[in-house]
Image: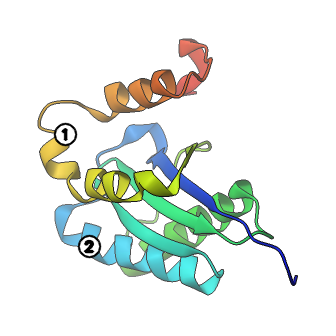
C-alpha cells in the first residue's frame, strides 16, 4: 500500500515440545538458516536466527500486512516439517505457544548479539529461567502453572 510505513520488530522465542533437548549442534546451523529462508519467503526480514538444543530465537522485521501469529505459525510449522524430512526426527515438534517481544530500532544490535551468543549466555542460565526473565522484563503477566503447558 503506498504511503504506508511500519516498523514491526520482534524478538520471538519458542521451545521444542516439552523442552526436549533434541536440536543437536550439528543440526542447529542448518535449522537456523532454513528458518531464515522461510522468513524471506514470507517477505519477513530475519535479522538474526539462533538458539540452543531446546529452543529458538528469531529477530524479525515483519511486513505491515503480517501479524506476528501468522509469522510464528508459518515458521514453526515449516521448520518442524523440515526437521522430520531432513533430520530423521519424525517426533520433532515445537511447543504450541511462543513469546514475541516488540523492540525498537535502537535495540536491534543488542538483540541480534544476544541471539548470536546463545551458547555463552546459556552457560549461566537455562531456557526456563531465560524465558521467565523475558516475560518479567516486559511486564507480561503470566500464571506459572500455564507457561509451559
Residue at 43% x, 79% y is: 34
Residue 9 figure quarter? bottom right
- In terms of depth relative to the viewer, which is nearer, 102 or 91? 102
Q: In the drawing, does residue 10 fall left or right of residue 3? A: left
Q: Which mark is residue 68?
A: none
Quadrant in which the C terminus is drawn: top right
In the rendered image, the vertical position of residue 50 relative to residue 79, given as above or below? above
Residue that carries the numbered disc 1 in the rendered image = 122
> Between 75 and 2, which is closer to the camera in this rendering?
2
Across and down, in percent, residue 146 comes to 60, 20
Residue 29 coordinates in the image, percent (x, y) = 26, 73
Tag 2: Cα neighbours inside 10 Å, few (<14), some, or many (≥20)? some
Q: Earlier in the sequence, mark 2 or mark 1?
A: 2
Residue plotted at (47% across, 47% down): 13
How far is mark 2 from mark 1, CA to CA?
17 Å
At a point 34% along the width and 59% down the height, the residue shown is 109
**4 or 147, nearer to the observer:** 4
Residue 74 is situated, as x and y percent measured from the top left of the image, at: 65, 68
Q: Quadrant of residue 69?
A: bottom right
Q: Nearer the viewer, residue 55 or 119?
A: 119
Q: Can residue 84 be seen from the camera position used here?
A: no
Residue 76: percent from left, percent from top = 57, 62
- Element at label 1: loop
Residue 49's place in the image compared with 14, above or below, is below
Give the answer, above or below, for where 29 lies relative to 22.
below
Q: Is residue 59 visible?
A: yes
Q: Which residue is mark 2?
A: 29
Residue drawn at 35 percent across, 43 percent down = 20
Rendered image quadrant of residue 83: bottom left
Q: 82 left or right of 71?
A: left
Amino acid at each position: 500500500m503506498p504511503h504506508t510505513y511500519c516498523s514491526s520488530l520482534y524478538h520471538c522465542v519458542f521451545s521444542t515440545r516439552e523442552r526436549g533437548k533434541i536440536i543437536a549442534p550439528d543440526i542447529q546451523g542448518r535449522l537456523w538458516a532454513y528458518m531464515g529462508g522461510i522468513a524471506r519467503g514470507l517477505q519477513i526480514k530475519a535479522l538474526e536466527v539462533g538458539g540452543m538444543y531446546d529452543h529458538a530465537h528469531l529477530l524479525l522485521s515483519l511486513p505491515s500486512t503480517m501479524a506476528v501469529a501468522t509469522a510464528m505459525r508459518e515458521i514453526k510449522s515449516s521448520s518442524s516439517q523440515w526437521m522430520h524430512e531432513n533430520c530423521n526426527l519424525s517426533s520433532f515438534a515445537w511447543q504450541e505457544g511462543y513469546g514475541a517481544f516488540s523492540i525498537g530500532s535502537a535495540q536491534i544490535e543488542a538483540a541480534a548479539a544476544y541471539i548470536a551468543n546463545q551458547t555463552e549466555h546459556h552457560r549461566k542460565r537455562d531456557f526456563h529461567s531465560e524465558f521467565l526473565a523475558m516475560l518479567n522484563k516486559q511486564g507480561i503477566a503470566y500464571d506459572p502453572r500455564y507457561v509451559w503447558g
